[in-house]
Image (cartoon, coloured by chain):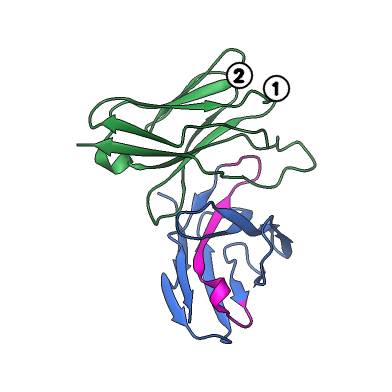
Chain colours: A blue, B green
Amino acid sequence: EADIYQTPRYLVIGTGKKITLECSQTMGHDKMYWYQQDPGMELHLIHYSYGVNSTEKGDLSSESTVSRIRTEHFPLTLESARPSHTSQYLCASGNRGTYEQYFGPGTRLTVT
Amino acid sequence: DAKTTQPTSMDCAEGRAANLPCNHSTISGNEYVYWYRQIHSQGPQYIIHGLKNNETNEMASLIITEDRKSSTLILPHATLRDTAVYYCIVPLPLSSGSARQLTFGSGTQLTVLP
């Protein structure tokens, strides 16, 4: 069983608020990812990191930002939440040299 | 990523083998086939991957044709908990300078019936 954690699991917040979604893994994986998925829709990569102080944007444009100061921690921040940010956010991690990724349980965000 | 084609949906009786096909006719020699699944409202789960030989683990078997243009994921004794969307993915080789990510696509909705 993969050890990757996301908090909060559910968040309802008003427009304009700043939010940070937490993601931590205890497997020592170099690579970490953030995906966004609307209900019934495909999963899209929004950010990834290949190691500390390394972050890149994914295929889907996102107003969120990420940081990777520690190997095990990859938080995602929205400076000013909007209803269009309502979605499920999934964090994943994996080792170099493979496309095996281990996913957290996700954060379901609703912006009112 | 090489393009993959999967059926939109499939049904399988509980206790029977579920055989999920995937076509990847444009696959190149050093590209692996990966399978993931996503149970409703959960994060995707890695199942198995292979290059050319058949692979088996505690979750499933992966059969890749000799020409590598298609593969089949086999769940030998499907249970109700195997109901999920199954994704067949052929990502760019990690040795490629462009290799970065998995593209999940729409997958196959497998429904295991009691």
| Residue shown at the point (60%, 47%) measured from the top left | A95
Q: Earlier in the sequence, mark 1 or mark 2?
A: 1
**Residue A83 part of the magenta-drawn span:** yes
Residue at the top extreme, as displayed = B66
As drawn, which residue projects farthest toward the front?
B8
Q: Which residues are magenta?
A: A78-99
Q: Amino acid at mark 1?
A: Gly
Query: What is the x, y in percent for residue A6?
Result: 47, 66
Q: Is residue A71 visible?
A: yes
Would you say residue A32 is visible in this rendering? no
CA separation in Å, label 1 and label 2? 8 Å
Q: Is residue B113 above or below residue B21?
A: below
- Position of B93 with respect to B72 (left or right) is right
Q: In x, y percent, where is residue A33? A: 60, 57
Tag on residue B15?
A: none
Residue A12 lies in quadrant: bottom left
- Residue under the image location 61 percent in, 77 percent down: A78
Viewer-closest of A64 and A33:
A64
Figure quadrant of the N terminus of chain B? top right
Which chain's residue wears label 1? B
Q: Is residue A15 above or below residue B55?
A: below
Q: Are marks 1 and 2 in contact (CB under 8 Å)?
A: yes
Q: Which residue is mark 2?
A: B68
At a point 45% along the width and 54% down the height, the residue shown is A40
Instruction: Kindly identify which residue carries mark 1.
Output: B29
The one nearer the camera, A52 or A9, is: A9
- Amino acid type, mark 2: Arg
Q: Secondary structure at mark 2?
A: loop
